[in-house]
Amino acid sequence: MSDSNTLRIATRRSALALWQAEHVATLLRRAHPGLVVELVPMTTRGDQVLDRPLAEIGGKGLFLKELEVAMQAGEADIAVHSLKDVPMELEPGFVLSAVLAREDPADAFVSRAWASLDELPHGARVGTSSLRRQAQLRAKRPDLELADLRGNVNTRLAKLDAGEYDAVVLACAGLLRLGFGERIRARLQAPQWLAAAGQGAIAIECRDGDARSQALARSLDDAPTATCVAAERAMTRRLQGSCQVPIAAQATLHEGRLDLAGLVGDAATGQLVRAQASGAADEAQALGERVAALLLDQGAGALIGR
């Protein structure tokens, strides 16, 4: 166990994960002068298996398991994640204690030769392994060739630059955090295009019952972001969504009112079912469940396999 003056952060080894963990460490040191914050970099199974889509090898939870084991073993006190990679239901014994202020939640269209999705020539090859992105791409451009694309941000950009793809779709947040903002040719944004639940937000996971670590983490919690992602995750949870199902959810908060747009799609056909609703900011969970119900009323269950 760490001493009372030290906090250890379990993190993946990718450049983006390390950036996020160091960002959290900097904020914790600033909020708690004298606190010693150390990073514990680790490699997860989700990082190791790159030749198959996540949906085939167990889903996004593969990015968490090794970090949770490290916390259970007392080798780390907290774990830092991209919230969109965190399953809707955590493993027993763990809690999300904080969600940091959100970066741009939109998806990014990235290409060397083309300025937008509409400009891509017929049959262009676009890289993404996200079923959510594939469904929306097929709905908008059924002529495109969609190809799997795994790996960290640097790897994906390198494959694009090597000519393996005409374009790729990545998260704006990751590009901006790593200093690749100039690679964003166009933002794919709401309401026409919806992001993943929690996209752009950093989450801190703690052991349930570890009051010290939870209190330190809570000092970084951003209430507006937490409200928005609570609605997005409630919708996805109600739909029993995982990375095996193309589900998108994006909430915005303005003057105490919360707006939530949701989408369920079919990655093979491009069929999309959409719904949206508004509610009070203090009823985020209920709003998420209401939008999920609207989606199910419109036939989303058939796309989810229910």
Image (cartoon, grey):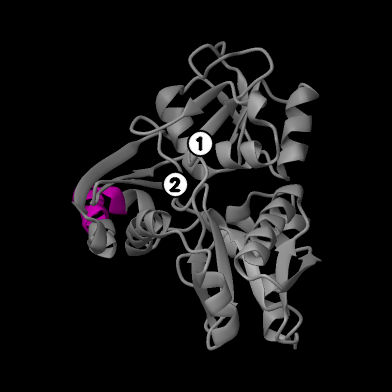
> At numbered mark 2, what does the secondary structure look like: helix, strand or loop?
loop
Q: In the image, is 118 to the left or to the right of 239?
A: right
Q: Are marks 2 and 1 in contact (CB under 8 Å)?
A: yes
Tell me, yes or no, if residue 156 can be seen here: yes
Q: Residue 75 occupies which quadrant of the picture? A: bottom right
Q: Which is nearer the N-term, disc 2 or disc 1?
A: 1
x, y percent for residue 185: 58, 21
The residue where tag 1 is placed is 134
- As drawn, 247 above or below 165: below
Q: Nearer the viewer, residue 41 or 235?
A: 41
Q: Amino acid at mark 2?
A: Pro
Q: Which quadrant is home to the C terminus?
A: bottom left
Which stretch appears magenta?
290-301
Q: What's the residue type where badge 1 is placed?
A: Gln
Q: Horizontally, is 180 left or right of 233 in the view?
A: right
Residue 58, placed above or below residue 294: below
Q: Residue, x 36% and y 53% (percent of image)?
A: 228
Name the residue carrying label 2. 246
**Numbered mark located on residue 37 in the image:** none
* Neighbourhood count class around disc 2 (C-alpha, 10 Å): few under 14, some 14–19, many 20 upward: many
Q: Position of residue 182 (x, y in %)?
A: 66, 24
